[in-house]
Image (cartoon, rainbow, N blue to C red):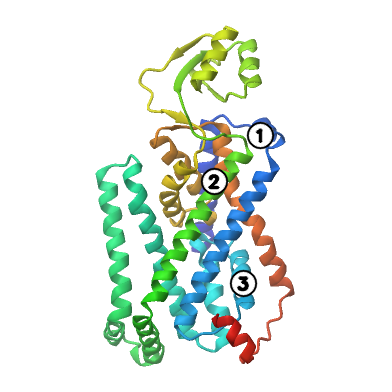
């Protein structure tokens, strides 16, 4: 019953956030169909490639850590396992399904359960460290309060300390386990876990490479927002100013003809709309006789979707998806991305919101390959590999 209630809450949060976003930016079904009818398909294909690149670096990071534990697995097997894990993790929060399947499958293949689980555990911490590195770079560029920045640095410090303790002072696990009433039953697995963590002491190079790979993983994941934006003709970041425009039928037609997005002010009964205009767009509307009034206290200084803006707000967006309140981070991801863009001075309208929403669907499109592998893959793995496979896996 508890699990059902949790799932109901997640569904409600997911659809609730999306509903509020679509309502705020006045996105209707016609807006969605028009946006995709006018989209650039080639950019959606590039978006899929950014996801493939992120997957590739993620597999390389996993492989480096497996090799550090002397778990030699053919690269092709890792690819299949990872894609199946992505498919199984499609509807789970924070990638739990992916990590669980990775640990299970490699434990089954190598007969080394403790080491397989340890690799996934360490990889998760290194993932957070890679994300933290990006956040350390981008935080000063995002307008956030001091309390949040302080909380993040505390989080970063805690993650780093836990990882260092597990690797260099793994015996602490034994000390904690001894205080538990079921220590005798867990003694074997705990000792294996301590031994596995200790093996990373002499593989600092592998740890550094794993962090570097992790940075590339997130850079490509964040880039999907940008490619989606280009596909939906959001355009690159351009400076300008916010105006209130009077809306007659003729004015709407002029704005639509110039591909200028606008958000209708409901308090004016649809008579005015908020628009963000570049100098060139303002000149064109003036020439066409459209009445407008500059918004003096606006906090927005540009519109569009620059790659720098995406990479700037990407790390915090990813942190938001790790909060297990929605289905696979849907809603939280889009809400955080749009909110952070706006806090950075970017004026956001319908197509930018749709570009954020498309991130999940582009990601899921890659998971189709995992579904195919899951349905067709043999599960009677052999644990011995040939000399050629060993050399190939370690090169």
Q: In the displayed structure, does residue 317 sit left or right of residue 145?
A: right
Question: Is the residue marked by circle 3 packed among few (<14), some (14-19), or many (20+) residues within 10 Å?
Answer: some
Determine the residue positioned at 30% across, 59% down. Answer: 155
- Quarter of the view holding residue 119: bottom left
- SS at circle 1: helix
Seen from the viewer's position, the closer of residues 279 and 150 is 279
Determine the residue positioned at 48% across, 86% down. Answer: 70
Determine the residue positioned at 56% across, 73% down. Answer: 101
Question: Is the residue marked by circle 2 packed among few (<14), some (14-19), or many (20+) residues within 10 Å?
Answer: many
Marks 2 and 1: which is nearer the front?
Answer: 2
**Residue 79: mark in rendering:** 3
CA–CA distance in space, label 2 to label 3:
24 Å
Q: Position of residue 170 (x, y in %)?
A: 31, 82
Reply above or below: 189 against 129. below
Q: In the displayed structure, does residue 217 sit left or right of residue 38?
A: left
Between disc 1 and disc 3, whose residue precedes? 1
Reply above or below: 252 against 35. above
**Residue 35: mark in rendering:** 1
CA–CA distance in space, label 2 to label 1:
16 Å
**Residue 225: mark in rendering:** 2
């Amino acid at each position: 019953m508890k699990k059902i209630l949790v799932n109901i809450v997640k569904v409600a949060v997911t659809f609730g956030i999306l509903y509020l976003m679509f309502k705020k930016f006045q996105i209707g079904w016609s807006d969605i169909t028009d946006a995709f009818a006018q989209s650039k398909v080639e950019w959606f294909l590039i978006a899929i490639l950014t996801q493939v690149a992120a997957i590739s670096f993620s597999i390389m990071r996993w492989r480096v850590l497996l090799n550090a534990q002397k778990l030699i697995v053919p690269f092709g097997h890792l690819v299949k396992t990872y894609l199946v894990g992505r498919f199984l993790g499609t509807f789970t929060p924070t990638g739990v399904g992916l990590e669980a399947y990775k640990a299970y499958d490699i434990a089954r293949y190598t007969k080394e359960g403790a080491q397989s689980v340890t690799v996934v555990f360490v990889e998760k911490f290194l993932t957070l460290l890679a994300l933290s590195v990006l956040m350390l770079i981008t935080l000063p560029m995002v307008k956030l309060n001091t309390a949040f920045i302080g909380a993040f640095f505390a989080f970063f410090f805690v993650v780093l300390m836990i990882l260092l303790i597990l690797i260099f002072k793994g015996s602490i696990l034994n000390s904690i386990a001894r205080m538990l009433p079921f220590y005798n039953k867990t003694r074997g697995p705990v000792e294996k876990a301590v031994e596995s963590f200790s093996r990373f002491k002499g593989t600092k190079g592998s740890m550094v490479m794993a962090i570097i790979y992790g940075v590339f993983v997130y850079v490509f994941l964040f880039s999907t927002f940008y490619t989606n934006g280009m596909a939906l003709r959001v355009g690159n970041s351009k400076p300008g100013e916010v105006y209130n425009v009077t809306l007659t039928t003729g004015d709407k037609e002029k704005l639509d003809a110039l591909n200028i997005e606008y958000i209708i002010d409901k308090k004016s009964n649809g008579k005015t709309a908020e628009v963000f205009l570049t100098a060139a767009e303002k000149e064109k509307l003036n020439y066409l006789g459209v009445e407008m009034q500059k918004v003096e206290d606006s906090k927005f200084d540009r519109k569009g979707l620059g790659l720098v803006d995406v990479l700037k707000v990407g790390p915090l967006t990813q942190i938001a998806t790790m909060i297990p309140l929605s289905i696979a981070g849907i809603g939280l991801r889009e809400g955080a991305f749009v909110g952070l863009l706006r806090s950075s001075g970017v004026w956001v309208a319908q197509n930018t919101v749709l570009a954020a929403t498309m991130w999940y669907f582009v990601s899921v499109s890659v998971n189709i390959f995992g579904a195919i592998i899951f349905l067709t893959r043999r599960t009677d793995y052999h644990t011995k590999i040939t000399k050629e496979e060993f050399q190939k896996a370690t090169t």
